[in-house]
Amino acid sequence: MPTSPLSYRATFGLVLKRDLTIAMRHKDDVINPLLFFVMVITLFPLGIGPEAQTLSRIAPGIIWVAALLSTLLSLDRLFKADHNDGSLEQMLLSPNPVFILVIAKITAHWLLTGLPLILMAPLLAVLLHLNEHSYSALMLTLLLGTPVLSLLGAIGVALTVGIKKGGVLLSLLVLPLYIPVLIFATSAIDTAALGLPYSGQLAIIAALFLGSLTLAPFAVAAALKVSTN
Amino acid sequence: MPVTNSNHSAINTASILLSATELTCIREERLLFDQLNIEVNSGDIIQIEGPNGSGKSSLLRILTGLSQPYDGKVFYKAQAIAQCREEFHQDLFYLGHLPGVKGEMSAQENLSFNLALQGSNAQHDDCEAALAKVNLTGFEESLASHLSAGQHRKIALARLHHSSAKIWLLDEPFTAIDKEGVLALEQLFKAHLARGGCVILTTHQDLLTFPAEQIKKITLEYSLNGYSE
């Protein structure tokens, strides 16, 4: 049977569809990080007290830290299962460029963790009495910032995928990389609460997004090569 | 260590599919093989022999490019494999210890994804036919997680029926496969060799239907020698 290498777009679609199919049949993998996100956020009003002023002051930080942690929790799914059953090897040995496969897998990861998180965030923001001027800033920073979390996280997972108990190491590797996103996102939301323009912070997060979108797939491909060696 | 004789200048290089020069592999400070030369022509069937831990799987992984040798190089049609990755992978079928079958997908979905990733234009019917040939009729729609280890390997091996790859690298292909399946595989090898392909495999079983003189052997020895520069 004749074979010819797939176009980049066809490869991307093929892998994306596969990852989404697998996730849909393994729903707890998708739902658990989301429940974790909700649960962490509901703990704060319980622990700190329902005082609106305090909560609204710390709301941006809480939402973003919870987003970081729940992304971290879901990162393992990105390559671990594929590594354990050998399908990662088969993908690396396919005649397609590895970075296309990697971008497809990261996109699937974002669609399954980042996107639901963005959709839940406004509801949880109400719970934390987030300042009413800050909602659009919250949504925009999450929209630009969560893909960065998936992209940078993928590098960490690719590096630790060959290690049996890489979970703690993964968080130590990845969390420091998340700090810039956290700083600029919460700063944007705080600035918005004061009614000031926050386009500067947004531009920096956008730059982080574009930078990691172009560079991370190559880093991941190289890291996977090392991990499967 | 007996190796296939390599004499690059004299032999007609057109029929050489895969060759390796002076391969050295060191794992955990143990020298597995040293200065190994291999030459695989179209029509060759090569069996890599040796006790457990002698480096058979490592050798196969090095030949695919998944692992890097300590020293030496692997060539596909006289080109270093890193220089012609996509061409080489187009022409390569590798089955490792792990079959690369996803439990969340059906036998049919697994096969068609793997074929599509390889760039094959096999349709639904082709996949069904291939699964029928490995005795998986009736299991097409069952999720792979409900199937046995042998059936997983059969799903992976079903790809051979639609593979246009010339180079087949198979690590213990007969593991967990029933007698009938082994004979069917050997028939498949014969047809593949007749088409000008080559098969390199590791197995502890003897090939039943091949005359002993047709099989070239590479014997690896288990050594406890540490490696010192």
Image (cartoon, rainbow, N blue to C red):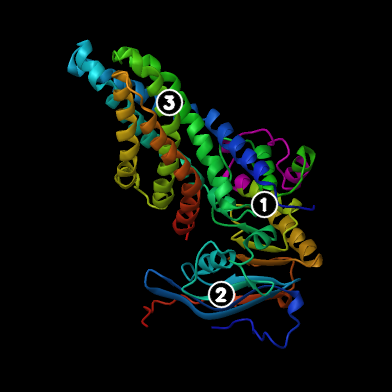
Residue at 73 percent of width and 58 percent of height: B183
Label 1 SS: helix
Instruction: Tell me: residue A133, above or below residue A64.
Output: above
Whichever of labels 1 and 2 marks the residue nearer the N terminus, that label is: 2
The amino acid type of the residue labelled 1 equals Leu
- Is disc 3 in the same subunit as disc 1? no
* Residue lying furthest bottom: B10
Mark 1 in CB contact with mark 2 (< 8 angstroms): no
Q: Chain of mark 1?
A: B
Identify residue for label 3. A140
Which span is picked out in magenta? Answer: B128-152
Work out how far the residue at label 3 is from the one at label 1, CA to CA, in angstroms: 48 Å
Q: Which mark is residue A50?
A: none
Identify residue for label 1. B157
Instruction: Tell me: residue B200, above or below residue A133.
Output: below
In the foreground, B169 or B66: B66
- Is disc 2 in the same subunit as disc 3? no
Residue at 32 percent of width and 47 percent of height: A173
Q: Quadrant of residue B17?
A: bottom right
